[in-house]
Image (cartoon, helix red, strand yellow):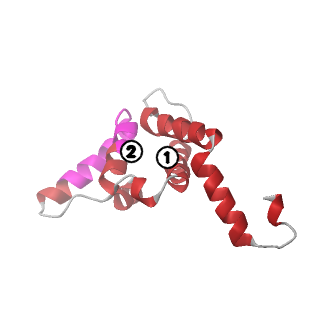
Amino acid sequence: MHAHEATGDAQAVWRDYSSYMGTSTTAYMELEDLLSLITSARITISYRGHMIKFITDWLDYIQRYEALVPTKSHFPSNMKKAMLQNALQGHNAFLNATQIESFSIAQGNEPLDFDAYVGLV
């Protein structure tokens, strides 16, 4: 990064940073950690933290993961929704969101996409 300090070439800095994040051991380890957090995080009835914080932290993990991988490696909307539902299924407060979506589907509507589900939750 310091190699471009004299030129002020922000695009060259970004190219170098992107290359580093795509090939470094540090980046690989961060991807592994984020993927583990995304797939293993669960909220339960015994969870004592703020539910909004749990959700925003989980969404942040997704955003950070997708910032480090190519676009073609991003999770599809339906997969992100399923992973979020799995993370939230242990808490009764989120049963309402599932019931609302089921009622909407019974009325002939399409299932909610990830963004709409996040808004509902």
Q: Secondary structure at mark 1?
A: helix
- What segment is highlighted magenta in the picture? 83-102
Is disc 2 surrounded by few (<14), some (14 to 19) or many (20+) residues within 10 Å? many
Work out whether mark 1 precedes mark 2 in sequence or the reverse, and give the earlier one.
1
Q: Position of residue 46 (x, y in %)?
A: 47, 26
**Res. 55 mark:** 1
Q: Nearer the viewer, residue 48 or 15?
A: 15
Q: Nearer the viewer, residue 34 or 102?
A: 34
Q: Secondary structure at mark 2?
A: helix
Q: Position of residue 66 (x, y in %)?
A: 49, 53
Image check: 66 left or right of 75? right
Q: Residue at x 61, y 43 (%)?
A: 27
Q: Main secondary structure of the magenta part?
A: helix
Q: Residue at x 31, y 45 (%)?
A: 82
User: On screen, 5 above or below 117?
Assistant: below
Q: Quadrant of residue 101?
A: bottom left
Say if mark 1 contacts mark 2, CB within 8 Å.
yes
The residue under label 2 is which amino acid type?
Answer: Leu
Q: Position of residue 39 (x, y in %)?
A: 42, 36
Residue 87 on the magenta span: yes
Q: Residue at x 54, y 56 (%)?
A: 67
Furthest residue in direction top, as rendered: 46
User: On screen, 49 above or below 76?
Assistant: above
Residue 94 on the magenta span: yes
Disc 2 target residue: 84
Is disc 1 surrounded by few (<14), some (14 to 19) or many (20+) residues within 10 Å? some
